[in-house]
Image: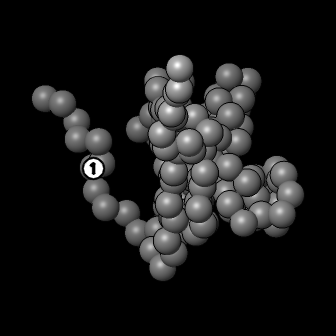
Amino acid sequence: MEKPFVKEKKQYAYVAENSALTLYVDANSNSEGDGSESAPFKTIQEAQAKIREIKASDGLPVGGITVLVKDGEYKLDSSLIFNEEDSGTESCPITYVSPPTEMLSVMVYPAFTFFSI
């Protein structure tokens, strides 16, 4: 029997507090950060790259990684693709969450490409 993608609904605070590592992303950040709360990444892709780096070098920490994506408008110049390389495990989940009181939007730009001949 196939396992459901989400086993149970977890509260935002519970997920953040019970992860071995929390990375922060804030589209409104003024500078490139290291993913800490005081110097968050500016893009979701930066958090994704950091997780891939951790997974390739040290392996995922038991307890997993939570990425807290703050409110804002995340403009992408290409598709954001998650694949097996971005997967966690049951004991080391990778979770992307946004605070329940905040609103975020992810948009790919340019939405349309026009060509003229």
Is 61 displayed left or right of 18 in the figure? right
Residue 62 x/y as whole percent: 57, 41
**Farthest residue toward the bottom?**
101
Count all numbered tags in the image, as a single digit: 1
Quadrant showing the N terminus: top left
Answer yes or no: is residue 94 visible: no
Residue at horizontal 83 percent and vertical 53 percent from the top: 33
Which residue is labeled 1 in the image?
7
Residue at x 77%, y 63% (from the top left corner): 29
Q: Residues within 10 Å of mark 1 (few under 14, many from 20)?
A: few
The spot of residue 26 in percent (x, y) is: 68, 62
> Most extreme residue toward the front, as rendered?
117
Front residue (pair 68, 57) = 68
What is the image's colouring?
Answer: one colour
User: Residue at position x 86%, y 57% from top?
Assistant: 31
Give the residue furthest to the left. 1
The amino acid beneath tag 1 is Lys
Residue 7 point in image, percent of width and height: 27, 49
Q: Please state if 56 lies on the left or on the right of 78 as rendered.
A: right
Q: Is residue 75 visible?
A: yes
> Residue 91 location in percent, x, y?
46, 40
Disc 1, SS: loop
Q: Is residue 65 left or right of residue 2?
A: right
Q: In the drawing, does residue 80 fall left or right of residue 6?
A: right
Residue at 52% in and 27% down: 115
**Is 37 located above or below residue 47 in the figure?**
below
Vertical arrangement, residue 18 with respect to residue 112, above or below:
below
